[in-house]
Image (cartoon, coloured by chain):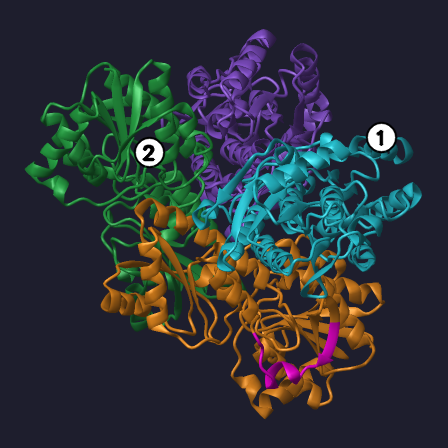
Chain colours: A cyan, B purple, C green, D orange
């Protein structure tokens, strides 16, 4: 390979810039040219492709978001769209592509690979929900954003002796709620992986009150239900007034933590190595403390499992 | 005076603990005993009053919330409630009271003063909406919490080239929206002090797009309308898709900024000085860079004015 | 005036970028062209001058440092250097210049003004030591950086029951030490404005120990003496072992606080207004809560006074 | 076992409180009484032992430092000291002890275990230097503190086009320097594990300058040499002026990151499980993404290895 590309796709996540920097510089280190594809698959179709030098990725390792921008792209789901993409890749003299994003982005990368253009996937999403890797880029930063929010809300919960419901991201995966709940000392954590049991939750709240617990934090992943809905259920059933905080978009941004920058650097560099071996259809990950690469289809055909031991531990410790 | 009390009331705000510390230690410095009244006016009625030594307020200057707790209290609005309060104050040997809170708390303090028990008010609220003082304790911290959120959201807004609406606190006062909007580089700021003009806003959005501006931040104070309502209006009228973030309760908590700790310290100390002169019915504030005290009734009979020059400047700079 | 310039000079301070943004956009708002002069007076002499559009200062309000760079320049102190500068200014069609920096930068601006080229000064320095203004751009951010450091060190001081000395910036002005000491709950504050009294300090330390105070924080401005020197004095005299932390360069950087962004915006905008009136030799400041402009020579001929009431209060509250 | 104790020893590290909370609550969950031993081994000898309920460890998971205090203790290194400790443990009805700290603390725990009193070790140190575990409690927080400092200093380095030397903790282990250097985008990282090569470093600095790199960050672990010494070497040899920042004690404190809170919780809970099985002389750790326990002697007889692949990667990416 003589020239490779890199793009970011799907929701942005902190640490994507560290991964972009690693792809560009690792490529240059190996004597390969690197081009940035701007605005995801849409930009690929439109040919928004530009050469990147080492200096173009200077001073970005500490920035949230993605310097290459991201966008949704319906057209790329069609054969016509994918053919246009392949055309642009050839026209720009690219031999391989690193795709940084979530499982949707991987599907696109696999489609290109199947059409004969080798792609490697790097897991960038705050949801930590990609099968085959223990961590995704952005999860650690989002997690710390959530616990800072919990710490702030706890000040008010304690001062006013109130129960707060905090809704965090996580449609299908409870990782963010689980880790944040344990780290934030939440009394209750509701995740999509566990059947919602209103009775049990009310029971815990009321037992807590009887033991003298005057404030309480409930973390709910958006995939279970929204915070306001939960508040209504609790009020109806147990006549306990709650306050709701929906953390929303602040969870996506911010300067990446050290871990997300290191993860982004490791993953981006490994993606280049794998690509330079000429192999497409691989995804990069961290498995049992080792950087690994594996068949990319695993990432969207298998299921990510949350670490349920954290769930059990949280219940034991929030007595 | 030989013994004075201190209580916090209404919504908690960061820096209240600095003010409590200042009241306790300044009192002790002047040879006066200081008692903490827990859980606001409700705790006063219930007699939750405890002596406080210098060590009891150690290691709290950096904490959000209020060590004395806060609570709503309907009973205190009645004659019977106020009489019970006076009884408790006498029973506990108190000669004066410092009340830290917003305008609602001041009304209570004035009621006690009129019944012959001298109270002094210290402005503690993130809304910065108390007439007679340029700043309230907690405003600076809330403001910095808001701009950190804006900075995070801007990462995503830029990466995805989207328009975001951020709803901040402020039912009647636009200070938080105004300062945060200017400091956060928001393109549009909507505050209760200014008539909402949908046409003008849409016009600015569209002009920005024509000039090549691909993302945009709109700050709206909750007193104008809620974020989702605004999003619908924009979508209906201009067919511009937006994302909404409601910052909510995270704005109240957190470790206070340096300024809020200094303000809390200055105000708490001055409150003790005023009280020891035997005068009740005074409120403490910062006016033209000086710590002042003034007739407390001013705080709930007059109107707070936001600094509209910030509004004008923000419009000029967000071109 | 049809075209004005802006430069930053001296040590960088957080909020300088907000001021640059305000100068550029306020100028454009008034129909004037604005050029950035890069790398301070050295860049001016070398003609590193470039036109700036509204978009060139987008996304910088939240960044520390200065987008225009800064540098020392011996040559500019000479007549020859200043004449070269005037030449470059004329060659680039500039009619006026906004200089953002400390008192050294103001001297340069005054020299140009005396040579017939109108300059206006904007106070950018973390030291808060410019006569004629109550606050300088960057002070609030540096202050919050210092108290975050104090909060961290207090964790260890408390856990190990130790005395810590924290050395902060401030060669001639004690503002940073003073505010940070009060806000950080320091037991002792040493500033250049106050005669250093070893006996009194030791006395306070020992009295504290007798009252059961097991840890202690001493804040010393670098202008008094360095932290290690102080540690030796305390060890020799009172046989108290201390730990020393020199905060150093972290005090200059970081994303500016809301206040520094607002201050930078207000000052930059006002500087443009003053300049467009055709007046040079003025400095911008905040005096008694009002943005003001005043004779620039005041800034380097008079003396800045620290607010000694904070010093007294800190002593009263750290019992 | 019916009653177990917990103590913290050695330098404090963020997340120790999460571990204490986990030990106390997990013990109570299993029906065992838990006592806190205050001020490390010194407090153990002196019998500063107090029962702890679930509520005693409420609201501490987010605090830096250690609620149980820590202290050095020469006496405990003697037979006499250890016998006194055993006596106190028996007198207080304790059947086992969890010791949270570094390798020095583990030696003490092993000594007690050999005397027939079962102890389990939990790795709490910011240095990440305990053999047998991939991570120690506090490392992640210290790491993030360091990169925040690097980010701040980079603002000034960039604005003034200067070379900065940042000295971080790490006498024997380079983990902190290594991770921070990679995550902070440092141009050069000096760690004790690698022979210091002045020529190579100067060479890199000069090549960077020739390529137009105008500022540079060098991270040096204190175990290699101190920052000022390094600055002199560089100035003498290459006539490059540098600025030095010694981060010092701020690296130990601060609210723990999410990861350190989770690690502390997992480790504390597992320590209780191991202890309740009646086994002493075990240390808890994280190995290949699994919580493990292993022979405690390994922790002070073997050598911790830094992940040198990070070192190589950093060199490749800082071109």
Element at badge 2?
loop
| B154 or C153, nearer to the observer | B154
The residue that disc 1 covers is: A232
Quadrant assignment for the N terminus of chain C: top left
Q: Is residue D210 left or right of residue B175?
A: left
Which residues are drawn in magenta? D292-305
| D41 or B236, nearer to the observer | B236
Image height of A313 relative to B227, above or below: below
Q: How many marks?
A: 2
The residue that disc 2 covers is: C135
| A28 or B199, nearer to the observer | A28
Image height of B168 relative to A82, above or below: above
Q: Is residue D165 left or right of residue D139?
A: left
Q: Residues within 10 Å of mark 2 (few under 14, many from 20)?
A: many
In the rendered image, residue D101, in percent from the top left (x then y), is placed at 60, 72
What chain does mark 1 sit on? A
């Amino acid at each position: 390979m003589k020239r490779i590309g890199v793009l970011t796709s799907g929701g942005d996540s902190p640490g994507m810039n560290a991964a972009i920097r690693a792809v560009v510089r690792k490529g240059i280190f190996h004597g390969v040219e690197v081009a940035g594809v701007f605005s995801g698959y849409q930009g690929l179709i439109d040919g928004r492709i530009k050469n990147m030098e080492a200096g173009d990725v200077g001073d970005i390792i500490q920035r949230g978001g993605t310097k290459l921008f991201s966008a949704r792209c319906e057209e790329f789901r069609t054969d016509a769209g994918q053919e246009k993409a392949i055309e642009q890749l050839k026209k720009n003299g690219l031999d391989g592509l690193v795709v940084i994003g979530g499982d949707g982005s991987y599907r696109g990368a696999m489609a290109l690979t199947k059409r004969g253009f080798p792609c490697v996937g790097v897991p960038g999403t705050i949801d930590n929900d990609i099968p085959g890797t223990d961590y995704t880029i952005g999860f650690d930063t989002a997690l710390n954003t959530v616990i800072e929010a919990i710490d702030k809300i706890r000040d008010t919960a304690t001062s006013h002796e109130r129960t707060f419901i905090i809704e965090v991201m996580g449609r299908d995966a409870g990782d963010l709620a689980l880790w944040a709940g344990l780290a934030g000392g939440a009394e209750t954590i509701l995740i999509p992986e566990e059947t919602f049991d209103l009775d049990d939750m009310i029971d815990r709240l009321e037992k807590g009150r009887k033991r003298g617990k005057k404030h309480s934090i409930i973390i709910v992943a958006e995939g279970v239900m929204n915070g306001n809905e939960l508040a209504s259920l609790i009020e109806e059933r147990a006549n306990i007034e709650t306050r709701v905080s929906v953390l929303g978009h602040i969870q996506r941004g911010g300067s990446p933590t050290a871990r997300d920058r290191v993860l982004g650097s490791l993953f981006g560099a490994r993606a280049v190595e794998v690509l330079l071996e000429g192999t497409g259809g691989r995804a990069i990950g961290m498995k049992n403390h080792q950087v690994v690469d594996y068949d990319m289809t695993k990432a969207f055909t298998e299921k990510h499992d949350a670490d349920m031991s954290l769930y059990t531990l949280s219940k034991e410790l929030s007595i």
